[in-house]
Amino acid sequence: MRYRSTRGGPVVTLDTALLTGLAPDGGLYVPVALPRHAADDWPGEMTAHALAVEYLTPFFADSRLADALDDIVAETFNFSLPMVSLRRELGAPVSVLELFHGPTAAFKDVGARFLAACLTRLDQETRNDKPLTILVATSGDTGGAVASAFHGRTGVRVVVLFPDGRVSPRQQHQLTCWGDNVTSLAVRGTFDDCQQMVKAAFVDEALAEQYRFSSANSINIGRLLPQSVYYAAASYAYFRAHGERLHWIVPTGNLGNGLAAVIARACGMPMGDIAFVTNANRTLPDYLTSGDYEPRPSLATLASAMDVGAPSNLERLRDLFGESDALRQHALTAQSVSDEEIEARIRADIRRLPFAWCPHSATAMVAWERLAEGDKARHWALVATAHPAKFETIVEPLIGTEVAVPPMLAELLDRPSNYVTIDAGLDALRAHLL
Ligand SMILES: *Cc1c(COP(=O)(O)O)cnc(C)c1O
């Protein structure tokens, strides 16, 4: 399998796409042709591991990592990704795919662990005098997941940039509790500023003399591939059991998780409609409605890991599947949810559900509630992207009680925190790195 830039530039192997993140022409790598899985021919009883390997194998054709795929999958998916039915509580066919049982309690652990497993293997082969430096801009969860996945691995450095004051206290702790080969920078600006700084560092000549950069943001294809595995696995299991396609509601910011769902479906996995939900940052819904793409500065919301005004992966979505008219025909929709709706949902649902939503996952429930009665008769899977304990300052006042902290998160919160605050812009980042 070869990968091409969305901007027409080079065609490269998976290994190059993983190591460089962004294409040299500023575009994002996409597969030259998506594989078509004949999931009907797959054996009915397949372990999640076997399915992940089967699903990913064509993406790894020609990669030096092909023989290691089995181990990479095992290292990545070493925590559970349960589907929890809410049929009893809601009296309707609704399930929640819980993606938050990894080390940093958000779905970002999947992509980060996969990237770490791939990059450390690739780097050992191409050992180089400049250590590989993973630059990661984070709106809250990516940085912690990437730091956790790479922490303690020799020969790789991680530099995390997060928007100062715009992440939850526990998220901030997760971003800053590492040390060793991980550096944490609080940027006086927004997530979009952090993302700009990473992009600018990639093409900066002074930095290129001393650093070899890769990106762990969802611009890296290595984030998307493993994320599409859990859609493939859950949809396949459902289809085998019920002979019907699951429909999906996916909370969305940079569109990495959402695009992964669309890719799984395009590869032939049995999936029905895909509904994206954004917070008050409505660039994506507005684009799908009007056809005009108008990136804008991000607004701060309660679902802060989705505060994105210029979703990077929209470039991939348009490249692979066409413009807004075509996208609507692909049974893709997008809608925006306000902070008031998020709060009301968290507050109301604690009375009918056995758990509290995190503010991001709550957007999916708001979107489900908006469905017409007929649509609610179809089986929907809501994607829960983070554990509510990461956002206790928002969730606990709404539910009037404490959220129990999962053990892995508790362990991280016990570690000391360390970071440096810098201005937005490449100059400040360059000064810090050199
Ligand atoms: C990153 C994140 C999102 C948004 O995911 P994208 O891939 O950027 O669309 C949603 N919820 C949580 C908790 C996240 O960390």
Image: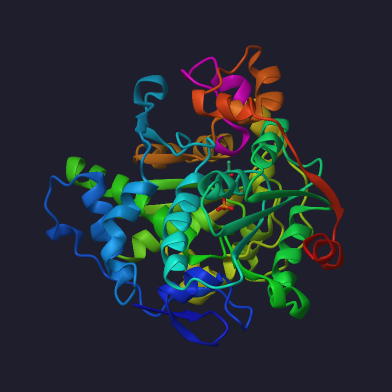
- Residue at the image position 70 percent from the left and 30 percent from the top: 416
**Magenta span includes 276:** no
366 lies left or right of 161: left
**Magenta span includes 359:** yes
Instruction: Looking at the picture, tell me which residue is in the foreground, 210 or 186.
Output: 210
Instruction: Looking at the picture, tell me which residue is in the foreground, 43 or 420.
Output: 420
188 lies left or right of 100: right
Judge whether residue 236 can be spotted in this image: yes
- Residue at the image position 20 percent from the left and 44 percent from the top: 47
Rendering coords of residue 132 (x, y %): 58, 65
Judge whether residue 244 can be spotted in this image: no
Rendering coords of residue 209 (x, y %): 71, 78
Relative height, residue 48 to residue 393 (above, below): below
Relative height, residue 168 to residue 90 (above, below): below
Instruction: Looking at the picture, tell me which residue is in the foreground, 378 or 231.
Output: 231
277 lies left or right of 382: right
Rendering coords of residue 131 (x, y %): 59, 66
Say which quadrant the N terminus sits in.
bottom left
The answer to which quarter of the image holds residue 144 is top right
Query: The magenta stretch spans which residues?
Result: 346-361
- Residue at the image position 59 percent from the left and 50 percent from the top: 335
Rendering coords of residue 375 (x, y %): 40, 42
Give the image's coloring scheme. Answer: rainbow
